[in-house]
Image (cartoon, rainbow, N blue to C red):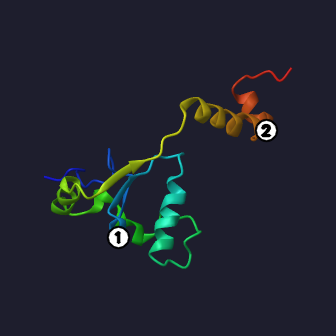
Amino acid sequence: GSISGGSGSGAFQNMIIFPSAKLAFCGIPKVGITQWIQFLRFIIGANDYPSWPHAKMEVNFFRFDKLDPTVQKRIWDDESWTFAAFLRDPAERALSAFLDKFETMGTNLKKTYGIDER
């Protein structure tokens, strides 16, 4: 069977492969995944690589969970492949979310959550 389930969800839904570099990158939402997909699209020569990349069809060719199960297993078992991820400090992420949702969105959100500005 497939390592990822091939369903487009689960543990491998954000794993992107860079075949020429033998790099499998596990993208984590809110930790730069959009920029990594844009970089991948730049590498393959997409003229519109700076645009929002998540709905671009060619990205599916580089998603680990979309590969044939035999290819997934071959990559997974091949020691010459590098698997990588970037992590973000949880405290910094919480602060970023707070600042994004409460500080930059104005008083409507503050009123919704009952935050007194005094």
For disc 1, the marked residue is 20
The secondary element bearing badge 1 is classed as helix
Task: Tell me the quarter of the picture where residue 6 sits.
Answer: bottom left
Q: Label 1 vs label 2: CA separation? A: 46 Å
Residue drawn at x 51%, y 65% is 39
* Residue count near mark 2 (Cα–Cα under 10 Å), binned few <14, some 14–19, many ≥20: few
Question: Farthest residue toward the left?
Answer: 1
Which residue type does callout 1 highlight? Answer: Ser
The mark tally for this picture is 2
**Residue 117 appears at what percent x and percent y?**
83, 24
* Residue count near mark 1 (Cα–Cα under 10 Å), binned few <14, some 14–19, many ≥20: few
The front one of 30 and 21 is 21
Question: Farthest residue toward the front?
Answer: 80
For disc 2, the marked residue is 106
The correct choice, above or below, for 50 with respect to 90 in the image is below
Residue drawn at x 59%, y 35% is 93
**Residue 18 appears at what percent x and percent y?**
37, 65
